[in-house]
């Protein structure tokens, strides 16, 4: 499976409070969350993002709160993939659980520019910056995460074990 | 090869004789926790899975604390959703507002004796790591993990490697656990312990009360840590003997110790005597400075409370320092005892009268302003010294407001002086 889209580039330590501020957490409706996604760091994001676009950021993406509303907001905004140098632990777990694709790739994180057209292949881990022609290879998912994804998410994974 | 304290707890909960950093394990959980923001989405998932009941009605803890007492209709609906679920599933550890034992989750859970040394808990709140202070394994997760754990009583973990933090000596006057953890975060950065355990050790540990340790473990997440754990000593045993006399008397807890040959990815030594009164300037907890070096920073508000600094020792310290003093003109000082028990203690000891005489606002226990929920939101251009745990952009209100993190003594001094100040000035 591969995705292709225009890049929204952000820096290091993008925290869950700027991804979705707590004042909007009185509802967990994905469309509501998407309508406020990134507003405290980039108030033009919501009006500019198109389905399939890709977010690229630096280290420690998603640090802070455990709110699963953060990956839900990003996914519901249309973002098809987040590439970062590294992810905060709880965000990493939540993203997989809600089915938001993420890739850790320091080289891609450093080289890709805001607005570039990027394509990424989840099976091979290859990230291509179509604008600059550069290619990068992301760390593959650990085996257990592949299993969760293959099951369709943590809910389905847990459900299949409960029935067993 | 030896194991760290965290690795030993995880191994036992996974039914394994040993584990190594990087292993993927499935561990049984002693407790599973959610709050009014994270539980409603978990309930939706729980019901969507067709789950009939929780794995154990006595091991699920549900706490309304973030937007409570409900700040608006939507938050009232969230709490109602959790309350109805708690009733339907006869959750014994649901803490309704005003009840004895209610308050901010990470204040009441240790205080109500729900976590003992050696326990393993996950909570859908990032500051669940607080309970590491008791020698337990505790870490934050999201709502889907909470939903699945409410069904199964277990979850998967990647066994973390650890950073050993060796504390030596005794802290100086007015230097608290908050200063120590801010100092550490300033040293290693907001991702300095990413995916790792922080294991605190050294003879400096005995100089730290349980409330100080809880503050330190609470903020392990602010440097990316999976958990932050303390060894079990006399202070721990004395604490659990009062919070859970039943389990304490039966010996129903385990004091784990790291093996002498346990491997650590890094060893950090901190001389507690050298830790200054510390603040974290906007907009990251790692942006630390000695409080004495930023005294020119004027402020509009002070918040004393939260899961980081709303415990009895914190509120007592605030009262002792504020006795006979006045909050500076034009400054709002909001005091939020972290639990009903702490609130009642403050009432019985006369601390509330001291706060009232000084010109403070006194609030019922709530997370409230810490996450920009309610009870003290900042306008554009306003600056707050706060004993809370995060100072991200917009955390306490407007995107152009600022939060400076500090311990209680610096917060009190700042409220009296109307700028960042140290307690020797008042």
Image (cartoon, grey):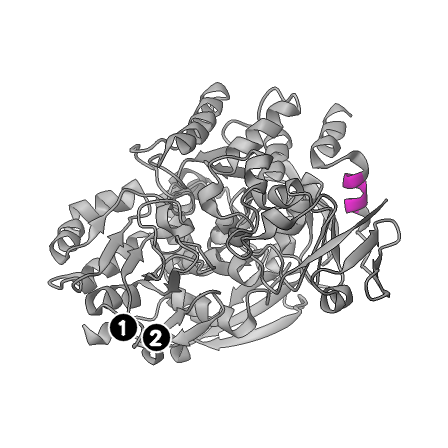
Q: Residues within 10 Å of mark 2 (few under 14, many from 20)?
A: some
For disc 1, the chain is B
Q: Residue drawn 61% across and 35% down?
A: B149
x and y percent of residue B155 in the render? Answer: 66, 40
Magenta range is A144-149
Check the residue under mark 2 and report the chain it is in: B
Front-lying residue, B216 or A116: A116
State how far apart marks 1 and 2 are (Cα).
7 Å
Residue B218 placement, left or right of B207: right
Residue B281 in view: yes
Residue at mark 1 shares a chain with residue at mark 2: yes
Residue occupied by mark 2: B291
Mark 1 Cα-neighbour bin, 10 Å: few <14, some 14–19, many ≥20: many
- Asked if residue A27 is positioned above or below residue B227 in the image, the reply reads above
In the image, what residue occupies the spot 48% across and 41% down?
Answer: A24
Q: Residue furthest right?
A: A124
Residue at x 78% of width, y 45% of height: A144
**Depicted B94 relative to depicted A148: above or below:** above
């Amino acid at each position: 499976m591969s995705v292709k889209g225009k890049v929204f580039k952000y820096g290091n330590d993008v925290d869950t409070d700027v991804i979705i501020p707590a004042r909007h957490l009185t509802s967990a409706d994905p469309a509501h969350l998407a309508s406020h996604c990134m507003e405290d760091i980039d108030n033009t994001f919501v009006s500019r993002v198109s389905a399939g676009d890709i977010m690229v950021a630096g280290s420690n993406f998603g640090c802070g709160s455990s709110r699963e509303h953060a990956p839900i907001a990003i996914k519901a905004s249309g973002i098809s993939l987040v590439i970062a140098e590294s992810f905060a632990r709880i965000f990493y777990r939540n993203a997989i659980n809600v089915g938001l694709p993420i890739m850790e790739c320091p080289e891609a994180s450093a080289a890709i520019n805001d607005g570039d057209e990027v394509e990424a292949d989840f099976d091979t881990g290859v990230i291509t910056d179509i604008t600059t022609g550069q290619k990068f290879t992301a760390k593959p998912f650990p085996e257990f995460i592949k299993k969760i994804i293959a099951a369709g998410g943590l809910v389905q994974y847990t459900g299949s074990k409960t029935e067993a | 090869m030896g194991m760290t304290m965290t690795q030993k707890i995880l191994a036992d909960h996974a039914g394994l004789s040993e584990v190594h950093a990087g292993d993927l394990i499935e561990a049984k959980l002693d407790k599973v926790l959610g709050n009014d923001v994270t539980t409603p989405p978990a309930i939706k998932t729980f019901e969507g899975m067709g789950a009939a009941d929780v794995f154990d009605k006595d091991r699920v803890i549900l706490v309304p604390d973030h937007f409570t007492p409900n700040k608006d209709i939507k938050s009232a609906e969230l709490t109602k959703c959790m309350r109805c679920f708690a009733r339907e599933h006869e959750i014994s550890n649901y803490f309704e507002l005003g009840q004895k034992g209610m308050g901010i989750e990470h204040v009441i859970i240790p205080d109500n004796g729900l976590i003992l040394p050696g326990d393993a808990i996950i909570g859908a709140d990032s500051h669940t790591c607080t309970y590491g202070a008791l020698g337990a394994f505790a870490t934050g997760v999201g709502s889907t993990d909470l939903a699945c754990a409410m069904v199964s009583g277990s979850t998967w973990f990647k066994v973390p490697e650890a950073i050993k933090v060796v504390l030596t000596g005794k802290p100086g006057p007015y230097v608290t656990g908050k200063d120590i953890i801010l100092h550490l975060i300033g040293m290693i950065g907001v991702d300095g312990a990413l995916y790792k355990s922080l294991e605190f050790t050294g003879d400096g540990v005995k100089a730290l009360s349980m409330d100080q340790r809880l503050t330190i473990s609470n903020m392990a997440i602010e440097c990316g840590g999976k958990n932050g754990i303390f060894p079990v000593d006399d202070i721990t045993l004395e604490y659990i003997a009062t919070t859970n006399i039943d389990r304490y008397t039966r010996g129903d807890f385990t004091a784990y110790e790291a093996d002498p040959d346990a491997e650590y990815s890094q060893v950090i030594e901190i001389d507690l005597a050298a830790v200054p009164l510390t603040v974290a300037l906007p907009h990251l907890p790692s942006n630390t400075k000695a409080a004495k070096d930023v005294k020119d920073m004027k402020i509009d508000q002070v918040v004393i409370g939260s899961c980081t600094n709303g415990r009895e020792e914190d509120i007592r310290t605030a009262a002792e320092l504020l006795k006979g003093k006045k909050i500076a003109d034009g400054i709002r000082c909001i005091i939020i005892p972290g639990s009903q028990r702490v609130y009642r203690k403050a009432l019985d000891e006369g601390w509330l009268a001291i706060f009232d005489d000084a010109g403070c606002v006194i609030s019922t226990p709530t997370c409230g302003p810490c996450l920009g929920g309610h009870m003290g939101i900042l306008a554009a251009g306003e600056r707050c010294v706060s004993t809370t745990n995060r100072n991200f952009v917009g955390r306490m209100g407007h995107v152009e407001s600022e939060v400076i993190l500090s311990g209680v003594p610096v917060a009190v001094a700042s409220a009296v002086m109307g700028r960042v100040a140290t307690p020797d000035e008042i």
